[in-house]
Amino acid sequence: MGVLVAVEGLDGAGKATIVAALSRGARARGARVGTLAFPRYDDDVHAALAGEALRGAHGDTGASVHAMALLFALDRRAAREELETLRRDSDLLLVDRYVASNAAYGSARRHETIGPFADWVRATEIERFGLPLPDAQVLVRVPPDLAAQRVRDRAAQQPDRAADGFEADAALQGRCAAVYDALVAEQWLSPWWVSDNRQSGDDALTRTADAILDAVLTDAFAPGSSVRSDTIET
Ligand SMILES: Nc1ncnc2c1ncn2[C@@H]1O[C@H](COP(=O)(O)OP(=O)(O)O)[C@@H](O)[C@H]1O
Ligand SMILES: Cc1cn([C@H]2C[C@H](O)[C@@H](COP(=O)(O)OP(=O)(O)O)O2)c(=O)[nH]c1=O
């Protein structure tokens, strides 16, 4: 049964980039690696609807914090079997965005830190939908203005990645960064590690991935070892 590690952070923080580096690094260490990314826009109707709502479709769906969060949550609910299969067939299952994304973005939209909305996400997704708790969560942390710059650069290179409603909202991204820090401080759902992804370049990326793998695999693979949370120095 593989270790389930969720990778979290702002839009443009570098989650997909770090998941790819983690996957390469873990395979180089001999681990079987599975990956999954939410929202599954191409594979699930709830995710597709959420993506369209982020770009203004479906009336006032996008304006409703709970409606958007339910669509993202139903996408994950529909992926339970896939999550189980991937986990069974791997040593490490990396998930790009998971339940904490709903807690972070929804709370930020409602101008809360950790409070009633995060509790509702936990009650809905973990307790009611039966989604597995992550073994560890990694916050890919960069200042919101750097994440926004990366979103703009990415959109310039890939026209199909033009900023959506959440990405274009700088104030929301700033509040979301604060909620992520609060989720880490509270160790919400599981142990968290924080990974600084301000530096650019392949060497920095490899060091970051190695530091995360050392932290996550060492603790997770050693039964009975004490689980700790740290800021990873890279
Ligand atoms: N450490 C880094 N230095 C420079 N650019 C980066 C770094 N990490 C990611 N990027 C670039 O920033 C953009 C956003 O990264 P991505 O991994 O797609 O973010 P996310 O999945 O968090 O939205 C991409 O164009 C990626 O190549
Ligand atoms: C998965 C997920 C995403 N989101 C938000 C974060 C992003 O701003 C937005 C879209 O997800 P994102 O991962 O950015 O998709 P893409 O980069 O392919 O457009 O949805 C939630 O609010 N809750 C969730 O559960």
Image (cartoon, helix red, strand yellow):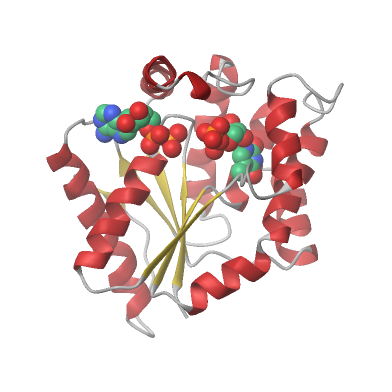
Nearer-the-camera pick, 162 or 168: 162
Callout count: 0
Of the 4 image quadrants, the one containing the C terminus is top left
- In the rendered image, which quarter is residue 192 located in? bottom left
Q: Is residue 163 above or below residue 118?
A: above
Q: Residue furthest left?
A: 203
State which quadrant residue 53 falls in. top right
Tell me if residue 37 can be seen: yes
Hey, which residue is sitting farthest bottom in the picture?
Answer: 223
Residue 119 visible in the shown view: no
List x then y, in percent, for residue 107.
Answer: 68, 35
For ligand 1, the image quadrant comes to top left
- Find residue 62 and report its horizontal and vertical position in percent: 77, 26
Q: Is residue 150 above or below residue 105?
A: above
The residue lying at 56 percent from left, 74 percent from top is: 85
Q: Residue furthest right?
A: 59
Tell me which corner region of the image, top left, top right, bottom left or bottom right, holds residue 212. Answer: bottom left
Q: Position of residue 171 (x, y in %)?
A: 57, 16
The residue sitting at 75% across, 45% down in the picture is: 45
Say which residue appears at 69% left-offset and 42% top-offset.
47
Depth check, front residue: 140 or 91: 91
> Is 39 placed left or right of 177 in the picture?
right
